[in-house]
Amino acid sequence: MKRKLFSLSGIVGLYTAVILSIGFLIFFVISIIVKGSSVISWEFITTAPRLGMTEGGIWPALVGTFWLSFLAVIISVPIGVFSAVYLFSYAKSTKWVSFVKICVNTLAGVPSIIYGLFGMALFVNMMGFEVSLLSGALTLAVLALPIVINASFEALSSVSPDFMQAAYALGATKRQSILRVLIPTAMPNILTSVILVTGRVAGETAPIMFTAVAFYNRQLPKSLMDEVMALPYHIFALMTEGTHSAKQVPIAYGSALVLLLLVLSISSTALILRYRLRKKRQW
């Protein structure tokens, strides 16, 4: 009897946690949509802010967010994937692999503000890139790297060893087996890391606050050395530093809604691509 009551209480607790999580998520999304949809328009998306960000749109911030996220992903994903391949296939010492994984896990848990200070010290000051698109993208790439390495290593570990043994039996070298069998087989799961990284870097404020963004800039970036606007910092600035809250708070919620839709669209595209790759591999 006690065992049944304990099991029932555990199930009830799990269902309650799930319902509360879904409820908070729905409340969050609905509140953003309700408060942000009033300012959403084609003009809001395609025009620059004006009059001290009390009017106008978010086009420079949208473009800046795209370039920061895109550059961070194309820098971090190849390095992270090949680092995971090295740890999985080439590193011979299990102690070395364990040590590196501990370091990677530690870096994955470091607060993002620390990455911002690191990026400012290394890329902005020491390397002389100043506050620029390049400094921000490199900082975000460093932040994303532990996520990519962890997810890619787990994806490679999920591939059956029989696949590699079959490639060796057919005369393939280790490099050929990795490039033509191991990585393509793990690619659907590796795309999971791309999804996680894209959502993480697109919504980060602290790392780019010191390295890339400007409070107010109507110009689009023309080179990697230009300052940019970005949606996360744009929202933060409107909510904390704005002097006309009646006009700026709705713009902040509209920016948050656009950022949410941007991340969801990117994630949905990656999920569809991952599904198609998995289906292709099954055939």
Image: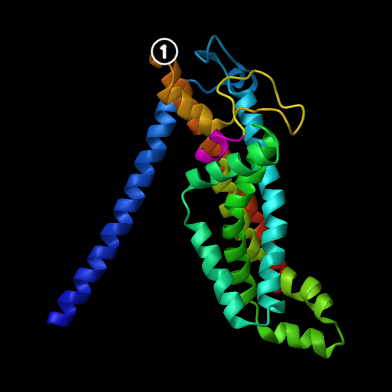
> Is 27 left, or right, of 86 in this rendering?
left
Is 191 drawn above or below residue 70 in the view shown? below
Q: Which segment is the magenta one?
A: 206-211
Is 269 drawn above or below residue 131 in the view shown? below
Is 41 drawn above or below residue 133 in the view shown? above
Classify the position of the N terminus by image quarter: bottom left
Mark 1: few, some, or many residues within 10 Å (few <14, many ≥20)?
few
Q: Is residue 207 magenta?
A: yes
Q: Residue at x 70, y 87 (%)?
A: 162
Classify the position of the C terminus by image quarter: bottom right
Q: Nearer the viewer, residue 65 or 223?
A: 223
- Residue 186, located in which quarter of the rendered image? bottom right
Residue 277 position in % (x across, y down)? 70, 63
Mark 1 falls on what kind of element? loop
Residue holding disc 1 = 244
Asked whether residue 271 appears in the rendered view, the answer is no
Q: Residue at x 61, y 17 (%)?
A: 43
Q: Residue at x 49, y 62 (%)?
A: 106
Q: Is residue 74 magenta?
A: no
> Is 260 left, or right, of 7 in this rendering?
right
- Residue 228, located in which quarter of the rendered image? top right
- Residue 68, located in which quarter of the rendered image? top right
Under mark 1, the amino acid is His
Residue 263 position in % (x across, y down)? 56, 42
> Is 188 left, or right, of 239 in this rendering?
right
Q: How is the image coloured?
A: rainbow
Q: Residue at x 30, y 54 (%)?
A: 19
Most distant residue in the right direction: 171
Residue 48 position in % (x across, y down)? 62, 18
Q: Nearer the viewer, residue 160 or 100?
A: 100
Residue 45 position in % (x across, y down)? 60, 24
